[in-house]
């Protein structure tokens, strides 16, 4: 019989759904800190701040584009 398995699957799906809000908040935060300096690991809110950071901290390094997807 598959009834028991279906129940377990449903519980798993509910658990995943209940965890989603937390995860999406973290994702939103991660998205807000998308740009990070690959040299000193400083996290910047966006590419402009990253460019400013590079200009002041690593003027001889090319600006990283790695964090952009
Ligand atoms: Zn840096």
Image (cartoon, helix red, strand yellow):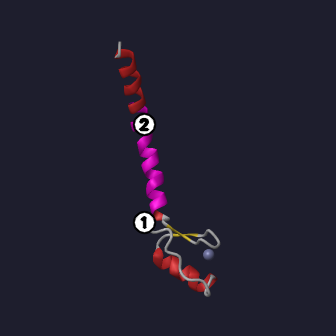
Callout 2: few (<14), some (14-19), or many (20+) C-alpha neighbours within 10 Å? few
Above/below status of 3 relative to 69: above
Q: Name the residue at the top extreme.
A: 1
Q: Is mark 2 within 8 Å of ligand 1?
A: no
User: In the image, which disc is placed on residue 69?
Assistant: 1
Q: Nearer the viewer, residue 22 or 50?
A: 50
Q: Is residue 28 left or right of residue 37?
A: left
> Which numbered disc, 2 or 1, marks the residue closer to the eye?
1
At x 41%, y 23%, the residue is 8
Above/below status of 60 relative to 28: below
Pointer 2 or 1: first along the chain: 2
Callout 1: few (<14), some (14-19), or many (20+) C-alpha neighbours within 10 Å? few
Q: Secondary structure at mark 2?
A: helix
Q: Which residues are magenta?
A: 14-31
Q: Secondary structure at mark 1?
A: loop
User: In the image, which disc is placed on residue 16?
Assistant: 2
**Residue 16, quarter of the rendered image:** top left
Residue 22 colored in magenta in the image:
yes
| CA–CA distance in space, label 2 to label 1 | 26 Å
Say which quadrant the N terminus sits in. top left
Residue 4 colored in magenta in the image:
no
Q: Is residue 54 left or right of residue 25?
A: right
View quadrant of ligand 1? bottom right
Say which quadrant the C terminus sits in. bottom left
The number of numbered discs placed on residues in the rendered structure image is: 2
Residue 37 point in image, percent of width and height: 58, 72
**Residue 60, quarter of the rendered image:** bottom right
Above/below status of 43 relative to 58: above
User: In the image, which disc is placed on residue 33?
Assistant: none
Q: Nearer the viewer, residue 49 or 7?
A: 7
């Amino acid at each position: 019989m598959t009834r028991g398995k279906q129940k377990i699957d449903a519980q798993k799906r509910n658990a995943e759904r209940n965890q989603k809000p937390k995860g999406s908040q973290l994702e939103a935060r991660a998205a807000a800190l998308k740009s990070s300096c690959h040299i000193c690991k400083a996290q910047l809110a966006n590419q402009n701040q990253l460019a400013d950071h590079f200009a002041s901290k690593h003027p001889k390094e090319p600006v990283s584009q790695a964090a952009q997807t």
